Image: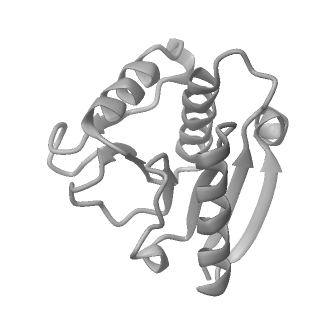
Amino acid sequence: MTIVTFYQLDESSADPSHDLMKACSSLLLTAYRKRKWSTVLCSDKKQAEQVDEFVWQHPVDEFIPHNLAGEGPKQGTPAEITWSGQPISNRHTLVNLSHSMIDNHRQYQHIIDFVPVDEVKKQEARERYKQYKMAGCQMQFTPANQLNESN
């Protein structure tokens, strides 16, 4: 059964976009350390490039081997960053930054999604939560500020 975890982003944050990137890279690092291959699904190529650049900023002792979709070695890397409209590799974990429901959610053991601060996007996240739940996924919800505590 697919586990879907929604992380609530901090509403008091001065920079929700930075918090999202930080949470995403923290989750990638955790998956990598557990030897789980993951995919980050972005809404577009620009966001994918931003995630890629953010992940490159990790200190050397927290390096995450990663690549953008279509780049990197033939066998891939532990973390792949892709965007809507691109093929998505079958991996253990999918980190969803695309603000849309994953059609083929059953191919992943763990899907990670976020509840943004923006009210419109927050409502969209609630709808995705309901859709995953109706699809029979095991649901989890936690504040993103507890991410570092659980890793």
Q: Is residue 142 above or below residue 149?
A: below
Say which of 147 and 78 sits in front: 147
Q: Is residue 12 above or below residue 29?
A: above
Image quadrant holding the N terminus, namely bottom right
Residue at image position (75%, 21%) is 13
Specify how the rendered protein is coloured: one colour
Horizontal and vertical percent position of residue 91: 41, 62
Q: Is residue 19 above or below residue 9?
A: above
Dividing the picture into quadrants, the one containing residue 9 is top right
Image quadrant holding the C terminus, namely top right
Dividing the picture into quadrants, the one containing residue 24 is top right
Residue at image position (52%, 50%) is 35
Residue at image position (50%, 14%) is 60
- Residue 86 lies left or right of residue 132; in this view the side is left
Dividing the picture into quadrants, the one containing residue 145 is top right
Horizontal and vertical percent position of residue 124: 58, 58
The answer to whether residue 10 shows anywhere in this view is yes
Say which of 92 and 129 sits in front: 129
Residue at image position (48%, 46%) is 97
Say which of 122 and 115 sits in front: 122
Residue lying farthest to the front in this orientation: 120
> How many badges with numbers are in the image?
0
Horizontal and vertical percent position of residue 92: 48, 63
The answer to whether residue 115 shows anywhere in this view is no
Horizontal and vertical percent position of residue 45: 26, 36
